[in-house]
């Protein structure tokens, strides 16, 4: 299955001659580029493609990996064996620049096996999906929060992972969903612990305005170490910003995959 993010928008003006004429004006923004991939989660490799339906549009992309930064030419495939974050925009002299389209792909290590401890915070009953086993099923995430997601609506969420054998680990990645209209927000902080020892901390700023629904990976890196158990502590958005209809209320946090490397 190929995953495609982006949308095509055309604007037409009906003329007195009964013909449709494409409106080209600097007051209209281009649709964002389309970024597609064979698989968001992959074991060995995947391919990412960025392009725009308007042939005259110039697509500019930046690709940041966890180990390198490169540029991706328009309409060109990139083959990767490493995790990548791709951000692309489109420009045209007769239109406003498009919004930025983003897509991330992550590599799965099939040799790491773990179970979620009963000490973990349980998800809300209506968003419990298939239980904690969903966090390791390696199914590529979707934007529909009613399917295949674990949802939490308390200020603090802790997920405890017990590995089947001592495992060298240096990175934790969380696949999350952002949908401000549905009160699903970025967390404010994520921390990784071994016992009570903090290994990594990530602070996430509060969104300044509502955005379209999107998938978001959060990556936490630390010095490699041999571990038997790790915990992830997530401070959710417990006071929605003033611009949101639910300002001051508790936001939701949705996660569907946890990756260890």
Image (cartoon, grey):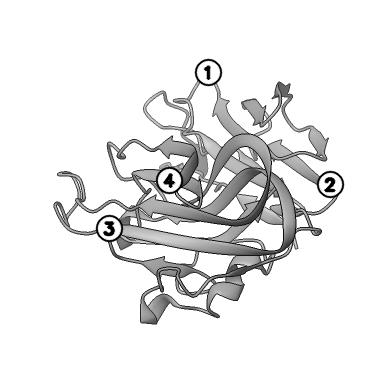
Mark 3 sits on what residue?
Answer: 155
Q: Nearer the viewer, residue 240 or 53?
A: 240
- Under circle 1, the secondary element is loop
Res 145 → quadrant: bottom left
- Which of the two discs, 4 and 1, labels the residue nearer the N terminus? 1
Residues under labels 4 and 3: Cα distance?
A: 12 Å
C-alpha distance separating marks 2 and 3: 37 Å
Residue mark closest to the camera, 2 vs 3? 3
What x and y, as percent, mark residue 85?
A: 63, 36
Label 4 packing within 10 angstroms: few (<14), some (14-19), many (20+):
many
The residue beneath circle 2 is 45
Distance from disc 4 to disc 2, alpha carbons, whole Å, reads 28 Å
Q: Which of the pair 247/166 is nearer the observer?
A: 166
Marks 4 and 1, Cα distance to the nearest angstrom? 42 Å
With 97 as the anchor, is 116 left or right in this view?
right
- For the point 59% across and 31% down, the residue is 88
Foreground residue, 186 or 73?
186
The label on residue 190 is 4
Tag 3 secondary structure: loop
N-term mark: 2 or 3: 2
Judged left or right of residue 29, residue 130 is right
Whether residue 67 appears in this view of the structure is yes
């Amino acid at each position: 299955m190929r995953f495609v993010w982006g949308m095509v928008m055309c604007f037409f003006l009906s003329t007195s001659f009964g013909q449709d004429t494409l409106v080209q004006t600097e007051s209209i923004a281009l649709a964002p580029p389309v970024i597609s991939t064979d698989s968001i989660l992959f074991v060995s490799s995947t391919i990412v493609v960025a392009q725009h339906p308007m042939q005259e549009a110039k697509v500019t992309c930046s690709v940041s990996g966890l180990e390198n930064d490169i540029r991706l030419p328009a309409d060109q495939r990139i083959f990767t064996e490493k995790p990548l974050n791709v951000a692309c925009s489109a420009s045209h002299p007769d239109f406003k620049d498009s919004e930025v389209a983003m897509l991330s792909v992550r590599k799965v290590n099939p040799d790491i096996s773990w179970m979620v401890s009963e000490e973990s915070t349980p998800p809300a009953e209506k968003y419990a999906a298939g239980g904690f086993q969903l966090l390791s099923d390696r199914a590529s995430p979707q934007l529909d929060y009613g399917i295949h997601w674990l949802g939490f609506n308390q200020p603090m969420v802790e997920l405890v992972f017990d590995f089947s054998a001592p495992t060298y680990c240096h990175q934790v990645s969380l696949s999350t969903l952002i949908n401000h209209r549905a009160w699903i927000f970025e967390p404010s902080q994520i921390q990784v612990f071994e016992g009570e020892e903090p290994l990594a901390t990530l602070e996430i700023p509060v969104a300044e305005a509502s955005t379209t629904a999107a998938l978001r990976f959060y990556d936490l890196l630390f010095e490699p170490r041999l571990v038997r158990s790790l915990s992830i502590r997530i401070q959710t958005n417990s006071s929605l910003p003033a611009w949101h209809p639910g300002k001051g209320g508790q936001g939701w946090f949705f996660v569907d995959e946890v990756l260890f490397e």
